[in-house]
Amino acid sequence: MEIILLERIEKLGGIGDVVNVKNGFARNYLLPNNKALRANDTNRKLFEANREKIEADNAERRGEAEGRAKDIDGKQIVLIRQASNTGQLYGSVSVRDIVDALAEDGVTGLGKSMVELERPIKALGLVDVKVKLHPEVIVSVGVNVARSPDEAEMQKQGIDVIAAMFEEEQAEAAATALEPDSEDEFEEGTPPSDAAPADETTADDAEEA
């Protein structure tokens, strides 16, 4: 389907561009969300008659978004989740979780469609997520998924929590393996302090002789 863009669409074009897209994409997303018009003679004339206002409105929204971007770009949110010792979550972190966490941190007015997450987060760690405040204003937010606030702080400092835990377990196992097993030693032979010399003669034995 041939359409006229009413705002910048990533990988398609900018305001006023006439492009071809799949029918489903146009009907299900672009047209109902007022992001484009069907490219027919009537809509072409309508767009040209309103181009100045459309571009002015877009510039105003972009300016507002740029103002918000300063307070959001680079922000990091912490999400505490249960996970296995391999770092896999018992569940996942969704776009809704991220929007809610940002709202709790004072970032309001975000819709789920503004958060770009290719797939749910299913493991511990740090993930950079794009937030589209405007078609031309995109910021990045860090999502720190951890099992506890302490582990979240470690991850923030660049420490791989799972690798550190594995190394700690390996060190403990090695230390345990090196510890002598005193009970086994006593079972194998009588301690020297409890054994009498083979040729020792007592005073009573000497008198009898």
Image: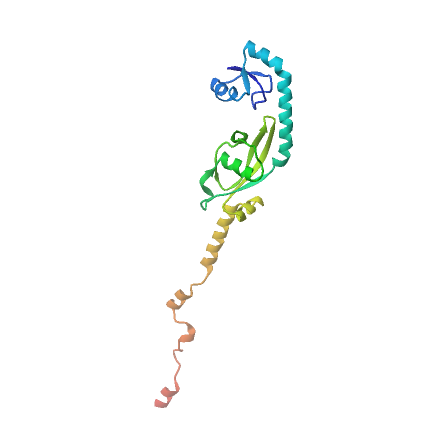
Q: Nearer the viewer, residue 87 or 5?
A: 5
Q: Position of residue 83 (x, y in %)?
A: 46, 44
The extreme left residue here reads 208
**Residue 136: image x %, image y %?**
61, 26
* In-front residue for pair 48/80: 48
Q: Specify whether residue 175 is in view.
A: yes
State the image coordinates of residue 158 (x, y, percent, origin top left): 57, 44
Is the residue 179 above or below the residue 89 in the image? below
Task: Give the residue drawn at x 64%, y 24%.
Answer: 59
Q: Which is more toward the observer, 191 or 157?
A: 157
Q: Residue at x 39, y 87 (%)?
A: 203
Numbered circles on residues, count: 0
127 or 184, nearer to the observer = 127
Task: Please state, as top left, top right, bottom left or bottom right, where the C terminus lies in the image.
Answer: bottom left
Q: Find residue 127 and report its image quarter.
A: top right
Q: Quadrant of residue 132?
A: top right
Q: As displayed, is residue 1 above or below residue 167?
A: above
Farthest top residue? Answer: 41
Q: What kind of colouring is applied to the model shown?
A: rainbow
Residue at the spot x=41%, y=72% of the render? 191
Q: Position of residue 33 (x, y in %)?
A: 53, 22
Residue 73 seen in the figure:
no
